[in-house]
């Protein structure tokens, strides 16, 4: 028997081939605003920075909304909680 290819390569100009039909297109993610060379330091006394990452109801905004890295999100959450305990926020 002759072997046949199961799927053809993307040659007709369609954006997706059969194999990548259910894959998401290449998305460009924003870089973390709190990491980098000129990024502000996360501290419980820096209320201006912490309030930027709180919702109107006072809840901490999730990483998918703020595009903050997981490590910095954890630091920020701890700083916000510390500021709440000290009644700064």
Image (cartoon, rainbow, N blue to C red):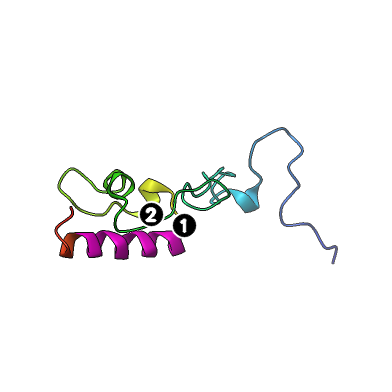
Q: Dividing the picture into quarters, in which one does residue 72 lie?
A: bottom left
Q: Which is nearer the eye, 86 or 70?
A: 86
How many numbered discs, if any?
Answer: 2
Marker disc for residue 51: none
When asked about the image quadrant of residue 77, the answer is bottom left
The spot of residue 83 in percent (x, y) is 22, 60
Q: Is residue 82 magenta?
A: yes
Label 2: how many Cα within 10 Å (few below 14, some 14–19, many 20+)? some
Point out the image quarter for the N terminus.
bottom right
In the image: residue 43, left or right of residue 22? left
Label 2 vs 1, first from the N-terminus:
2
Q: Horizontal placement of 88 versus 67: left or right?
A: left
Image marks 2 and 1: residues in contact by CB distance under 8 Å:
yes
Task: Give the residue at x 26% y 59%.
Answer: 80
Q: Position of residue 21 (x, y in %)?
A: 57, 48
Label 1 Cα crowd, 10 Å radius (few <14 / some 14-19 / many 20+) = some
- Left or right, residue 56 beside residue 67: left
Write down the residue under mark 1. Answer: 69
Q: Which residues are magenta?
A: 69-83
Q: Decide which of 40, 71 is in the foreground and name it.
A: 40
Q: Secondary structure at mark 2?
A: helix
Q: Nearer the viewer, residue 7 or 24?
A: 24
Residue at 77% x, 38% y is 11
> At 56% across and 51% down in the image, what residue appears?
36
Q: Residue at x 22, y 46 (%)?
A: 55
**Residue labelled with disc 2:** 63
Q: CA distance from mark 2 to mark 1?
A: 7 Å
């Amino acid at each position: 028997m002759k072997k046949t290819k199961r799927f053809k390569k993307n040659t007709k100009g369609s954006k997706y081939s059969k194999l990548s039909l259910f894959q998401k297109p290449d998305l460009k993610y924003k870089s973390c605003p709190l990491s980098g060379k000129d990024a502000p330091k996360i501290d419980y006394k820096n209320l201006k920075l912490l309030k930027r990452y709180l919702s109107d109801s006072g809840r901490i905004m999730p990483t998918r909304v703020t595009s903050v890295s997981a490590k910095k999100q954890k630091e920020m959450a701890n700083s916000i909680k510390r500021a709440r305990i000290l009644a700064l926020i």
